[in-house]
């Protein structure tokens, strides 16, 4: 995605968690809420990059965040044992939401 220089002046984005989801600590969540309340953080048009920007600022005030990748954060479709599943229809999301609540993270056949 081409971003105008008025929106992002840097050559590259900071490190960020790319994909269908991410898990953050309560300390990071509290920092983000507090900094938004103080109007010290801005929202960028891509939410995963926004999170990277916020974590970069968090890193300047606290212990460094380590990014890790797990294949259970699945990028394309779904597989049993998932943490997240990307590119799902609304019906599929409802089905996927119900599965872990019943004790199993299994994919749904409906698309």
Image (tube, rainbow, N blue to C red):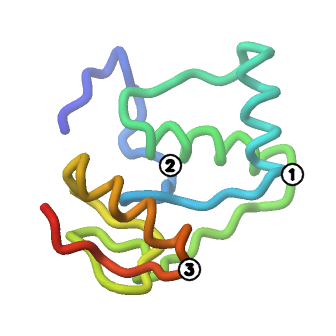
Which residue matches tag 2? Answer: 14
In the rendered image of this protein, does residue 19 appear above or below residue 14? below
Give x and y (percent) for residue 48: 44, 46
- How far is the residue under mark 1 from the one under mark 3? 36 Å
Q: Residue at x 51, y 72 (%)?
A: 100
Q: Quadrant of the N terminus?
A: top left
Residue 80 falls in image quadrant: bottom left
Depth check: give the residue in front, 104 or 81. 104
Tags 1 and 2 in contact by the CB under 8 Å rule? no
The local crowd at label 3, few if under 14, some if 14 to 19, many if 20 or more residues have their Cα within 10 Å, is few
Element type at marker 2?
loop
Task: Give the mark nearest the N terminus, 3 or 2.
Answer: 2
The local crowd at label 2, few if under 14, some if 14 to 19, many if 20 or more residues have their Cα within 10 Å, is some
- How far is the residue under mark 3 from the one under mark 2? 37 Å
Element type at marker 3?
loop
Which residue matches tag 1? Answer: 62
In the rendered image of this protein, does residue 100 appear above or below residue 72? above
In the rendered image of this protein, does residue 98 appear above or below residue 49? below
Task: Give the mark nearest the N terminus, 1 or 2.
Answer: 2
The local crowd at label 1, few if under 14, some if 14 to 19, many if 20 or more residues have their Cα within 10 Å, is few
- How far is the residue under mark 1 from the one under mark 2? 17 Å
Q: In screen coordinates, is 39 left or right of 108?
A: right
Give x and y (percent) for residue 16: 49, 54
Q: Residue at x 33, y 61 (%)?
A: 95
Q: In screen coordinates, is 30 left or right of 45?
A: right
Element type at marker 1?
loop
Q: Residue at x 51, y 24 (%)?
A: 43
Give x and y (percent) for residue 101: 55, 67
Which residue matches tag 3? Answer: 103
Q: Quadrant of the C terminus?
A: bottom left
């Amino acid at each position: 995605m081409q971003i105008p220089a008025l929106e992002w002046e840097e050559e590259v984005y900071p490190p960020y968690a790319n994909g269908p989801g991410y898990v953050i600590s309560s300390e990071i969540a509290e920092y983000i809420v507090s900094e938004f309340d103080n109007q010290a953080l801005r929202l960028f048009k891509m939410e995963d990059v926004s999170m990277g920007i916020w974590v970069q600022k968090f890193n300047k005030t606290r212990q460094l965040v380590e990014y890790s990748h797990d294949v259970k954060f699945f990028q394309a479709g779904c597989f049993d044992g998932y943490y997240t599943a990307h590119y799902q229809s609304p019906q599929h999301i409802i089905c996927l939401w119900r599965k872990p609540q019943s004790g199993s993270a299994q994919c749904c056949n409906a698309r």
